[in-house]
Amino acid sequence: MDDLKQKYLGQIANAADEAALETIRVAAVGKKGEVALKMRELGKMTPEERQVAGPALNALKDEINSALSAKKAGLADAALDARLRDEWLDVTLPARSRSQGTIHPVSQVSEEVTAIFAEMGFSVAEGPRIDTDWYNFDALNIPGHHPARAEMDTFYMHRAEGDNRPPHVLRTHTSPVQIRSMETMGAPLRIICPGGVYRADYDQTHTPMFHQVEGLAIDKDISMAHLKWVLEEFVKAYFEVDGVDLRFRASHFPFTEPSAEVDIRCSWEGGTLKVGEGDDWLEILGSGMVHPNVLKAGGIDPEAWQGFAFGMGIDRIAMLKYGVPDLRAFFDSDLRWLRHYGFAALDQPTLHGGLSR
Ligand code: DAH
C-alpha cells in the first residue's frame, strides 16, 4: 500500500495538465483502478486482516482523491496566472497620438451641423441621391417649363428605349427630402437632411458633386420669426461666436413664399474672414415659408399646417469656417490636403464638448 501511495502521489505531483491528472485518476481510484482491485482482495482476507486493510485502503483512496483535487486547483490557478500575464494591458498608457486617417471637413461639418440642430429638436432625415424628377422638381412647385429646371444644370439618368419608368435625375438639391419626410412622417415635423447633391458645373467654387443641408419645420403656428431665431442660433453655435447679425434679403424660390436669402455680417480684414464683425455681408443660405403647393405634394393640409425651410451649402460653410480656399480640393483625395484640413478621428463634435475642439 505504501508503494501505491508513493507511486500515485508522485505522479500527481508531476502531472503537467488536467488530461494527465484524469489518466492518473482512472488508473488509481477509477472503477477498475489499482485501489479498486485491492479492495476486491478484501474478500479473501481473514476478518482480522480485513479490519486493518479496509480502513487503510479507504484512507489511501481519500488521500489520492484529495491530492488529485488539490493538484487540479493548482493547475487551474497556474493557467489563470499565465493568462493574466499574457493578456496584461496597461490602460494608463496614452492613446496613440495621431491615427493614420482623418475625418474629411465635409463629414466634420455635417456632424457639427447635426449636433447643433439636434439640440433644437431636429432629427436627421435621408433620401436617395438618384430621385425622380417629380421629387426633385414637380413636388417642389417647379413645373416642367420652369426656368429653375434649366438653371440647375441637372444630370439626367440615361433611359433605355421603351423604359416607361418616370425620368430619374441626380438630385440637384436636398429639397426633395422635404417631400419624402412629409410623406413618411406627416406633421408636425422637424428635420434636417445633410447630403450630397449634383449639378453639371465646375470651377473654383463649383464641383459637379457637393453637399447641402436642408432644414424643414412644420407645425400649427410656425412663422418667419422662428426661422430667423433658429438660423441665428445655428450661426452663433456653428461659427462659435457670441453674437452675429443676419440680414434677410427678399428673394425667390418656387418652393417657398415668401423667400429670403440670408447673409451674415463679416469682415475680410487682413485677408482672413471674421464672422460677426466688420461691414461685409456673406450669403450663406436660401430659406422661406414652405409654399402651400409643396405641403400638398407632401400630403399635408396647408389650411392646417405651415412651416419654414432652408437650404445651405455644407462645403461652403466648411470653407468659411476652416479657411479652405478652393472647393475642388475637397474632392481630390490628396492625402497631404486631408492631413492638413482633416480632423482627428476620435473627436466627436458636440455642443457641450466643443464643436471644433
Ligand atoms: N434648394 C435650394 C438650392 O438648392 C436651396 C433652398 C432655398 C432650400 C430655399 C430651401 C429653401 O429649403 O427654403 O439652391
Image (spheres, rainbow, N blue to C red):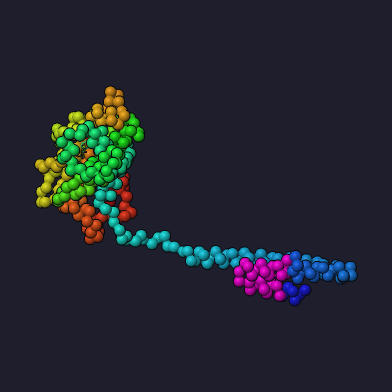
Q: What residue span does the magenta drawing correspond to? A: 7-30
Left or right: where does residue 14 sit relative to residue 306? Answer: right
Q: How many marks?
A: 0
* Nearest to the observer: residue 266 or residue 101: 101
Vertical arrangement, residue 311 with respect to residue 68, above or below = above
Where is residue 129? Give x, y as percent: 28, 44
* Nearest to the observer: residue 254 or residue 233: 254
Where is residue 204? Give x, y as percent: 14, 51
Vertical arrangement, residue 278 with respect to residue 36, above or below = above
Instruction: Name the chief secondary structure element in magenta.
Output: helix
Which corner quadrant of the image does residue 254 belong to? Answer: top left
Vertical arrangement, residue 187 with respect to residue 70, above or below = above
Left or right: where does residue 303 sit relative to residue 270? Answer: right
Residue 151 in view (yes/no): yes
Q: Residue at x 15, y 36 (%)?
A: 147
Q: Residue at x 25, y 45 (%)?
A: 158
